[in-house]
Amino acid sequence: MQELSQQIAFILELDKLKAVYRKALIKADNNRYENSAEHSWHISLTAHVLAPYANDAVDISRVTLMLLIHDIVEIDAGDTFAFDHHSVLGEQADKERAAADRIFGLLPLSQREKFISLWHEFELAETPDAQFAKAMDRILPLIQNMQNEGGSWAQNKVLRHQVIKRNHYLESSAPKLWEYVLAQIDIATERGWLRGE
Amino acid sequence: MQELSQQIAFILELDKLKAVYRKALIKADNNRYENSAEHSWHISLTAHVLAPYANDAVDISRVTLMLLIHDIVEIDAGDTFAFDHHSVLGEQADKERAAADRIFGLLPLSQREKFISLWHEFELAETPDAQFAKAMDRILPLIQNMQNEGGSWAQNKVLRHQVIKRNHYLESSAPKLWEYVLAQIDIATERGWLRGE
């Protein structure tokens, strides 16, 4: 039963992701901040719903598991805002690597290796699965902000070109969604939710 | 682009599950109530971690999608406590069927049919996938309550035999986990977190 004890320790550790709050706002719950656990659920399901737009190389089951685990490192490293300065984001990457070793390290060896390797694949964003997963992580805040008068963009004075760059994985992994995103960014700019320069 | 508009309407609708609160408590976040979105994330990942104990017939990718969608009906129907009276739970089933038609009905036809059929399969709990999914939905509160001095059991005066009954899907879908659960229920009873009769 030693393996089971390790697995249960990991499952319990996951509870802590529900206490990591992001900059995104939940309109449906009095605009409180979103936590990384519910966000992970939302993008995992978003990936299933938008799967018909993914290019043929994408395996949606792998994408789903990648998205379910992608934010777990925030339990130790915290969330950083997507549009923070590069220096902040660089330091964050080191913290996240250490967090992956500690948290996935709670699991039995074979699962530990599988999860760490999947998390690295997501971070590197070089495979079709990882690129589609990254794209889902990034399209959802856009969809939410478009329904919430600019939401976290407007609150944090985000620039139009930052959002275009952040969503660029869609260009190859789901071209139809890329067109949609560019059109939404135009609308957001016209309405003053994104800054033009 | 009409299909995409329907898919985005569905994705936005999902935000509301983050405002549906359960009786379960999050120890890691000052014992606030858990919402059904973060709970769905937690059990989807729990299913992956405990997959090695599932019997051979279980397809963990289908189980994951089932768990990601299983609580969406609560957006309209609300959450009911697992140990409420049968009359309350019967009324709830009617509300949930109507909710499934409305919410999954936001999707394009092919996805709508797939999701509704998967949700029905989960509810009926007759296939190996649905039974393992149900088992995951039920083992997680047990794991959480064991770490939290009885948690929602102690708060709601739950009886030992109710918890045994609720976890019985494990007996066939993951026999090793069933042994573990019975041992935990014994400990909870000894400590007074579950009532004996």
Image: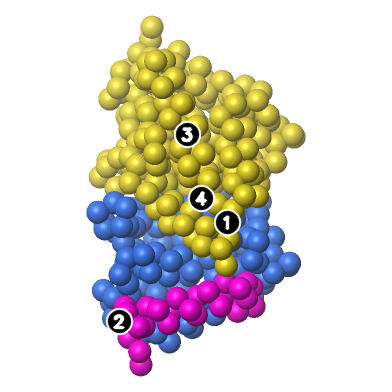
Chain colours: A blue, B yellow
Looking at the image, which is closer to me, B52 or A44?
A44
- Most distant residue in the front direction: B2
Q: Amino acid at mark 2?
A: Gly
> Residue A49, which numbered label?
1
Image: B125 above or below A194: above
Q: Looking at this view, name the residue that lies furthest to the top.
A: B197
Q: Is residue B84 left or right of residue B101?
A: left
Is label 2 or label 1 in front? 2
Residue name at image x 30 percent, y 81 percent? A192
- Camera-side mark, 4 or 1: 4
Q: Chain of mark 4?
A: B
Q: In the image, is residue A71 part of the stretch drawn in magenta? A: no
In the rendered image, residue A182 lying in the magenta stretch gets the answer yes
The crowding category of the residue bearing disc 3, from other C-alpha atoms within 10 Å (few below 14, some 14 to 19, many at least 20), is few
Among the two numbered marks 3 and 4 on one chain, the one whose residue lies closer to the N terminus: 3
> Which residues, given as a range, are shown in magenta?
A170-197
Q: Which residue is mark 2?
A: A192
Q: Can you see residue A11?
A: no
Q: Amino acid at mark 3?
A: Ala
Q: Where the N terminus of chain A falls, by quadrant?
A: top right
| Residue at x-position 43% and y-position 66% | A143
Marks 4 and 1, how far apart in space? Answer: 11 Å
The Cα atoms of the two marked residues, 2 and 1, are separated by: 29 Å
Q: Which residue is mark 4?
A: B106
Q: Could you confirm whether marks 4 and 2 are on the same chain?
A: no
Mark 1 belongs to chain: A
- Residue pictured at 48% horizontal, 53% vertical: B10
Same chain letter for marks 2 and 3? no
CA separation in Å, label 3 and label 1 = 21 Å
